[in-house]
Image: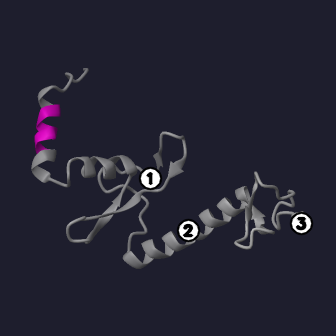
């Protein structure tokens, strides 16, 4: 059975097994190639996330702990700060960058552990240069 050849509706590239998604009937491809589909999905997600942040009153893009406005991940991709929440109660606390958000999570959101870590760092801090 021959599979009909189609082009991406956005970039006009010929859809193949490598760059296209098959429909559930498995005879035809969806209208967008993998790259355009991912870009469209990201665009829709960002629009929803922006509305969610506005509804929660979290329009500031700055991390509440370190003040950064963006986070660069290991892959080099720039991400906006995350909406932080208490895992026990579900209450939203604010906006945090990925590093600060991960740090809180690694310390199990325990203030005593965080204070102990801060005291440890202060005890072994390098002397300030004059």
Residue 98: % across, % down = 39, 50
How far separated are the C-alphas under marks 3 and 1? Answer: 47 Å
Reading the image, the residue beneath label 1 is 69
**Residue 45, labelled with which disc?**
2
* Element carrying mark 2: helix
Residue under the image location 73 percent in, 60 percent down: 36
Residue 32: % across, % down = 76, 65
| Nearer to us in this view, 123 or 29 | 29
Quadrant of residue 14 within the rendered picture: bottom right
Quadrant of residue 60 within the rendered picture: bottom left
Reading the image, the residue beneath label 3 is 4
If you read the primary sequence from the N terminus, does the residue marked by circle 3 or circle 1 appear first? 3
In this view, the mark in front (3 or 1)? 3
If you read the primary sequence from the N terminus, does the residue marked by circle 1 or circle 2 appear first? 2
Residue 99 included in the magenta stretch of the image:
no
* Element carrying mark 1: loop
In this view, the mark in front (2 or 3)? 3
């Amino acid at each position: 059975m021959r599979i009909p050849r189609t082009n991406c509706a956005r970039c006009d590239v010929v859809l193949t097994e490598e760059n296209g998604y098959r429909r559930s009937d498995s005879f035809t491809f969806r209208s967008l190639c993998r790259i355009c589909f991912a870009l469209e999905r990201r665009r829709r997600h960002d629009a929803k996330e922006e509305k969610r942040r506005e509804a929660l009153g979290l329009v500031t893009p700055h991390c509440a702990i370190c003040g950064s406005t963006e986070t660069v991940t290991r892959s080099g991709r720039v991400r906006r700060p995350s909406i932080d929440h208490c895992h026990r109660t579900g209450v939203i606390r604010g906006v945090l960058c990925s590093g600060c958000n991960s740090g809180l999570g690694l310390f199990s959101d325990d203030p005593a552990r965080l204070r102990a870590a801060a005291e440890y760092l202060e005890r072994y801090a390098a002397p300030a240069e004059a």
